[in-house]
Amino acid sequence: MTVQIDLAGRTALVTGSTQGIGAAITAALARAGARVAVNGRTAASVERAATALRGEVPGAEVVEVDADVSTDDGTARVLDLLPSVDILVNNLGVFGPTPALEITDDEWRRYFEVNVLAGVRLTRAYLPGMMERGWGRVQYIASDSAVAIPAEMIHYGVSKTALLGVSRGFAKAAAGTGVTVNSVLAGPTHTGGVEDFVAELVGDSLPWEEAQREFMRQHRPQSLLQRLIEPEEIANMVTYLASPLASATTGAAVRVDGGYVDAIVP
Ligand SMILES: NC(=O)c1ccc[n+]([C@@H]2O[C@H](COP(=O)([O-])OP(=O)(O)OC[C@H]3O[C@@H](n4cnc5c(N)ncnc54)[C@H](OP(=O)(O)O)[C@@H]3O)[C@@H](O)[C@H]2O)c1
């Protein structure tokens, strides 16, 4: 038996998808046949990502959505460009280290606005249409940091914990409608900037494969995978959850963390 995922006829919006995990998700959904909307803050970055995607997935139907989804105006622009979607992947998230006692009110607010409220607002806009049509998929890209709050960025961790509650809550709002709502806990992933980060910590004399394993051994010893996760590996789970195959998975927090979180169930 072969497992096939066919998303032909579905439209998907992936927020923050001009690079990193978001770009890998748009590629995976496009490969499965979905029409995909690439989102970032500038027309230039969105156009660059959309062109790369069309090259990577020949025949892909790509919509360019340049809008800052952390603002009301930006969200209004998204809804203008894309009045209805079948699959909403709230991938956008910012992160960066700041000592707990130095995180200001403004920073706490920014993390809430970008990492939590942007996804809430888009869910509020798109979920009713999905429920009316009797099919839809909403996902939030959370993190191992949602359940293992990192000491160096508690505001980030807390924003991801909030997403687990948001996801569970909207899943209840969509109960019995054919729409599923889930969150995906991504673990340490090989995205832009991470290679520099690894080189900073373990030196730049080792080839990448060895360097990342050394980094994981020294700095992420809880990982059972013992290497960074590739963005495509997160995208595989998102694509499965977006598919008809995952019809009985809703209100869940699903881990793609390489076993990083030392728990049997999330
Ligand atoms: N990387 C990891 O190891 C890791 C681990 C666990 C979870 N995650 C989560 O996975 C998600 C993606 O992370 P990533 O590392 O792939 O991100 P990233 O490489 O930093 O990419 C961020 C993306 O968001 C866009 N963006 C930033 N602010 C925006 C805004 N206000 N409105 C619209 N787009 C915006 C950027 O595009 P423009 O610059 O073009 O605007 C870019 O495409 C995040 O939620 C993150 O918390 C990441």
Image (spheres, rainbow, N blue to C red):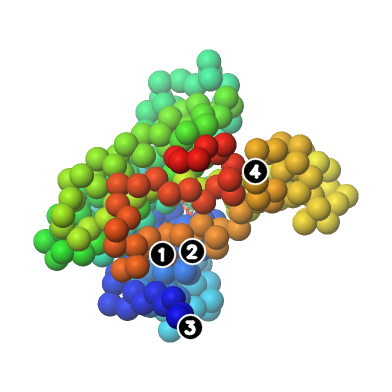
| Mark 3 CB near ligand 1 (8 Å cut) | no
Provide the residue designation for mark 3: 58
Q: Inspect the image, locate mark 3, and give the three-letter code of the amino acid beneath it.
A: Pro
The residue most toward the right is 205
Callout 4–callout 2 Cβ contact below 8 Å: no
The residue identified by callout 4 is 223
Instruction: Report whether residue 164 is seen.
Output: yes
Residue picked out by circle 2? 236
- Image quarter where the N terminus lies is bottom left
Q: Residues within 10 Å of mark 3 (few under 14, many from 20)?
A: few
Residue 81 at x, y = what percent?
Answer: 26, 64
Nearest to N terminus: mark 4 or mark 1: 4
Q: Residue at x 46, y 35 (%)?
A: 146
Of all residues shown, which one is farthest toward the top?
101
* Residue drawn at (42%, 65%) of the image: 239
- First in residue order: circle 3 vs circle 4: 3
Real-space CA distance between mark 3 and mark 1, rounded to the nearest whole angstrom: 21 Å
User: Sequence-wise, which precedes: disc 3 or disc 1?
Assistant: 3
Against 140, residue 99 (above or below) is: above
Q: Nearer the viewer, mark 3 or mark 1?
A: 1
Measured in 3D between alpha carbons, the distance from the residue under mark 1 to the one under mark 2, in whole angstroms, is 6 Å
In percent of width and height, residue 139 lies at 35, 53
Q: Is residue 84 left or right of residue 237?
A: left
When the figure is inspected, residue 157 is found, relative to residue 40, above or below; the finding is: above
